[in-house]
Amino acid sequence: MNIAVLSDLHLDMNSNFVGEDLLPILIETFVEKQPDLIVIAGDLSDHVTSTITMLDEIEKHVKVKILFIPGNHDIWVRNNESSWDSYKMFEKHPSSIINKPFVVNNEYVIIGDMGWFDYSLAAESSSMYEILSEKEDWGDHKYTNWNMDDGELNQVMLNQLEEQLRLNKDKEVIFVTHFVPYKEYVIRSNEYMNWDVYNAFMGSVRMGELINRYANIKYAIFGHTHERYPLYKDEQKTIICNPLGYIGERNVETFKQELEKSITIINI
C-alpha cells in the first residue's frame, strides 16, 4: 500500500499569492500519483469551513480515502467563534482521525491529533516575559479562542493521543501530529525573526517524549515549521517533516513542482 503524506498546503494563501485556484492542481497531482491513501497533517486553509470544503472536493475527485488532522490555521476563528467548535467539526468529519484511529490493515494503524505548544521549544535564553510579549502578535493568539491556556490545551492533546496509543499497543503505528515534537526541528534565529523566542509556539518536547515512549510507533509525521528535512530513521521509527509551506517563502518555478517535492510516499 502506498500512502501519500503531506502538510502545510495553505491552499487559500498560496492561491492568493499566485493568483490562481491551486486546488485543481492538488487534485490533478494526486490523480497522477495514484496513492492508496492520503494523509494531510494540517494547515489546508485558514478556517474550518474552507478546509472541510477542500477535503470533500479532494476525496470526490481523487476517489481515494483522505485522512486529516487540523493544524493551527485550520482552527483559526473569526469574531466570537470558538476554536473548540471548529475542532469538533473536524472531529466529526469523515476524514478525521481525532480520537478515531484508522486501521490500515492487520499490521498498521494511523493515530493522530493536532497537538499544540507549551513554550518548551523556546531557547533556554528566552524569558517568560519575552515569550508572552511576542505571543501578543502571534497568529495563534490573535485568531484562536480556546478559553484555556496553552499548557492545558497541549496536555489535552497529549492525553487523547496517549489513550489511543494505549488501545493500539498490538499494532504498528503511523503517528500524525501538526506541531513540532523535537527540538532538532525548530527554526534557528535569523536577521528577520527571533526564533529563539518564537519557537515557544512551534510545539512541545512532551509530544516527542510521548512518541519515544511507544516503540510500536514506526512513523512520526508532522509539519508546522515550514523547513523541510530529509527522512530520518532511528532504531524505532522514521520521522517525516516535509511541509509545503508558503510559496512566497521559496524560489520556485511552479506550484506543482513544489507540491511534488513536499509529498512523501510511505510504502507498507
Image (cartoon, grey):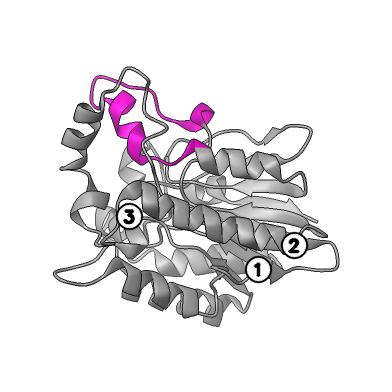
Q: Is residue 216 left or right of residue 16?
A: right
Q: Where residue 63 sits: x, y (%)?
A: 62, 79
Q: Find out whether residue 6 is within the magenta segment.
A: no
Mark drawn on residue 220:
none
Check disc 1 and report its element: helix, strand or loop. loop
Residue 241, x across and y down, in percent: 55, 41
Seen at 49% across and 29% down, the residue is: 183
User: Are the two marked residues, 2 and 1, in contact with CB atoms closer than 8 angstroms?
Assistant: yes
Q: Earlier in the sequence, mark 3 or mark 2?
A: 3
Three-letter code, disc 2: Asn
Q: Which residue is mark 2?
A: 168
Q: Is residue 1 visible?
A: no
Looking at the rendering, the stretch of residues picked out in magenta corresponds to: 183-205
Residue, x 50% and y 36% (percent of image)?
Answer: 205
Residue 179 spot, x, y in % from top left: 46, 47
Asked whether disc 1 touches disc 3, contact meaning CB atoms under 8 Å apart, the reply is: no
Q: Which mark is residue 14?
A: 3
According to the image, label 1 marks what residue? 101
Which secondary structure lies at badge 2? Answer: loop
